């Protein structure tokens, strides 16, 4: 005689044939053995299904960190993020968007990962923080003839037109300090063009992205200098996930990032 045992759990279906000659020969050991086989098969199926999850990754075009090259999103920050995802065994899809849109998607959509994101006190409880990408210092850049240095008061700086990407860490930092002449931009390239056209006086950037931007956007930056160092509470960039993301995915990514750093 034979039974065909079919067990379904979530997206897993396990079929196990069970043979015996007569009820008298049906032992408890045989039954336990069958259930052990079923448990093993179900666990393997569950692990396989877990890795089918595709993580939605969003970022912005920020030269020197992440950018498009021949249609592919590359850069040192992209390398750190994708290696962690691959190490954890997940698949992913990266979109390059205006920062404000990417930020809102990461805030509202489950299993969405965002980079490169400054870890500030305001954002601390809004995301699961996966790992650090790099530490950076931010400056206000402008033409060298402006009468600005690190001794310039905030009250004086507030009189200048400053370009800043909406929902960026610097945008929130300056907004909280009551800077009322912020010129919102969707992309870093706009800051360079607006400064050259004298439509803004200053814009925030770190040294590496500024130098790369001058080259990438073909801007003559010989007279543009870092005039004022910003005192942000955090100048470290991270990759992070939406707060409602599956916690096991978050933990796997955090563990993968730690392994890669060793």
Image: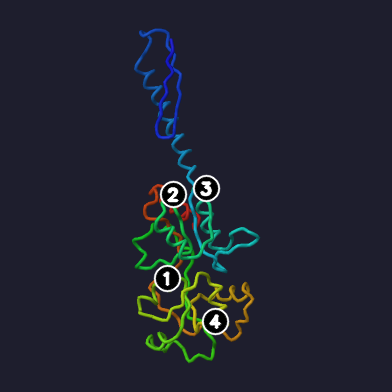
- Looking at this rendering, what residue extends furthest in the right direction? 70
Q: Name the residue that disc number 3 marks.
A: 91
Mark 4 neighbour density, 10 Å: few (under 14) some (14–19) many (20 or more): many
| 2 or 4: mark nearer the eye | 4
Nearer-N-terminus badge (1/2): 1
Task: Tell me how far mark 2 sits from mark 4, CA to CA.
Answer: 43 Å
Mark 2 neighbour density, 10 Å: few (under 14) some (14–19) many (20 or more): some
| 1 or 2: mark nearer the eye | 1
Nearer-N-terminus badge (1/3): 3
Q: Indicate the secondary structure of the residue bearing disc 2.
A: helix
Q: Is residue 81 above or below residue 19?
A: below
Q: Name the residue that disc number 1 marks.
A: 169
Task: Give residue 153's position: percent from left, percent from top.
Answer: 39, 88
249 sits to left or right of 198: left
Q: Quadrant of residue 132?
A: bottom left
Query: Residue at position x 36%, y 60% from top?
Result: 126
Task: Tell me how far mark 2 sits from mark 3, CA to CA.
Answer: 13 Å
Task: Tell me how far mark 3 sits from mark 4, CA to CA.
Answer: 40 Å
The answer to whether residue 63 is seen in the rendering is: yes
204 sits to left or right of 23: right
Q: Name the residue that disc number 4 marks.
A: 195
Task: Give residue 80's position: percent from left, percent from top.
Answer: 52, 59
Question: Which numbered circle lies on residue 252?
Answer: 2
Nearer-N-terminus badge (4/1): 1
Task: Tell me how far mark 1 sits from mark 2, CA to CA.
Answer: 27 Å
Query: Residue at position x 48%, y 77% from top?
Result: 163
């Amino acid at each position: 005689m034979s039974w065909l045992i079919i067990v379904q759990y979530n997206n897993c279906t396990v079929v196990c044939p069970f043979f015996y000659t007569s009820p008298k020969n049906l032992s408890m050991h045989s039954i336990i053995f069958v259930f052990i086989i079923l448990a093993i098969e179900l666990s393997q199926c569950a692990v396989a299904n877990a890795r089918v999850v595709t993580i939605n990754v969003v970022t912005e075009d920020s030269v020197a960190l992440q950018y498009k090259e021949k249609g592919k999103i590359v850069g040192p920050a992209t390398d750190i993020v994708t290696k962690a995802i691959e190490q954890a065994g997940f698949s992913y899809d990266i979109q390059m968007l205006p920062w404000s849109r990417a930020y809102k998607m990461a805030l509202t959509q489950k299993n969405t990962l965002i980079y490169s994101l400054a870890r500030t006190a305001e954002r601390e409880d809004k995301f699961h923080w996966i790992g650090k990408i790099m530490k950076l210092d931010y400056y206000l850049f402008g033409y060298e003839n402006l009468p600005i240095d690190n001794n310039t008061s905030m009250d004086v700086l507030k009189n200048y037109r400053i370009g800043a990407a909406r929902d960026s860490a610097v945008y929130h930092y300056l907004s909280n300090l009551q800077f009322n002449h912020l010129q919102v931009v969707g992309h870093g390239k706009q800051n360079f063009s607006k400064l050259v056209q004298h439509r803004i006086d200053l814009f925030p950037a770190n040294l590496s992205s500024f130098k790369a931007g001058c080259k990438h956007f073909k801007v003559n930056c010989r007279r543009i200098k870092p005039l004022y160092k910003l005192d942000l509470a955090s100048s470290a960039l991270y990759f992070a996930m939406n707060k409602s993301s599956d916690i096991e995915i978050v933990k796997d990514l955090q563990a993968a990032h730690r392994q890669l750093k060793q």
